[in-house]
Amino acid sequence: MFEKILFLLFLSSALAQELCEPGTSDGYKVRFSIRTALGSDAYAWNEDEKFLFRATLAYAMRKQKSELQFEVSNVIVCGETQRVSFWFVVTSPLNATRLISKVDVESAVRKSRPRINSAFLLTDKTLEFVGISPTLAAPVEPATPPWLIVFGVVMGLVAAGIVALLASSLVQRKRRKKEAHERHTQRHREENGSANEGVYNMSFSDNERVTQM
């Protein structure tokens, strides 16, 4: 019984090595830049970190294909280097000899990229899936909707126009009132001037008549 178990383990390991090879068409290469990202707080890459990577990929695949129950064993890693880079492939939970297509793996990585990055305290720049472009940051939505800003600007312009129109009408009204008052004053002065001249002339005529006498 023990010999059969050892044989199955050896067979599964050999099969995994055949499925996962550097440069395989359904695999992806991964590069970790732990020291660059964390400096003196960098952690060592070991079997535990590798297990965490495989677990996060299995989680991502479950989120992508909810009808399948991916396990850690479905994520196979190969071609490791000391600079923490390696290749990985994902096998089907229904058939361990069949690889999940590269398109499905890429979609799963894109969908769960923030969770994968946070698991290793890294970013898109320091945890690189070669061939998968970095995720785009979600667009920042302004606190005030754009349509409300436009509406406010238009209403402000309308209000400014109304105020300018009212101010112009008020100024013109005051100007007309002032001009009418000035005309009335001028007319009054002219009438008073004519009356004064008539009185003066009559007095002058009387004096002149007395002198002659």
Image (cartoon, helix red, strand yellow):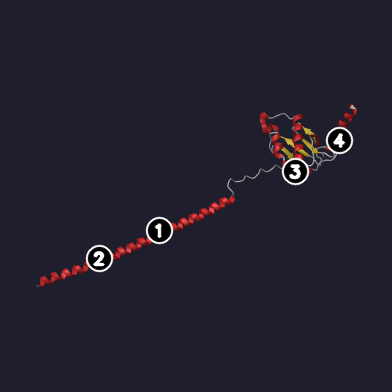
Q: Residue at x 45, y 58 (%)?
A: 165
Under mark 1, the amino acid is: Val
Q: Amino acid under label 2?
A: Asn
Residue under label 4: 15
Q: For the residue labelled by badge 4, is the local secondary structure a helix, a strand or a loop?
A: helix
Crowd class of label 4 (few under 14; some 14 to 19; many from 20; radius 10 Å): few
Task: Name the disc covering residue 192, or none.
Answer: 2
Mark 4 or 1: in front is 1
Between disc 4 and disc 1, whose residue precedes? 4
Identify residue for label 1. 171
Residue drawn at (27%, 66%) of the image? 190
Q: CA distance from mark 4 to mark 1?
A: 94 Å
Q: Is residue 75 left or right of residue 115?
A: right
Q: Earlier in the sequence, mark 2 or mark 1?
A: 1
Which residue appears at 56% of the width and 52% of the height? 150
- Position of residue 92 measured from the top left corner of the image (x, y, whole percent): 82, 40
- Residue 73, position in %: x, y? 81, 34
Locate the N terminus by quadrant: top right
Residue of label 3: 107
The residue located at (29%, 66%) in the rendering is: 187
Name which of mark 3 and mark 1 comes first in the sequence: 3
Q: CA distance from mark 3 to mark 1?
A: 69 Å
* Distance between mark 2 and mark 3 Cα atoms: 101 Å
Q: Is residue 170 visible?
A: yes
Spatial CA distance of label 4 from label 3 is 25 Å
Q: Using residue 49 as the reference point, say whether residue 188 is left or right of it.
A: left
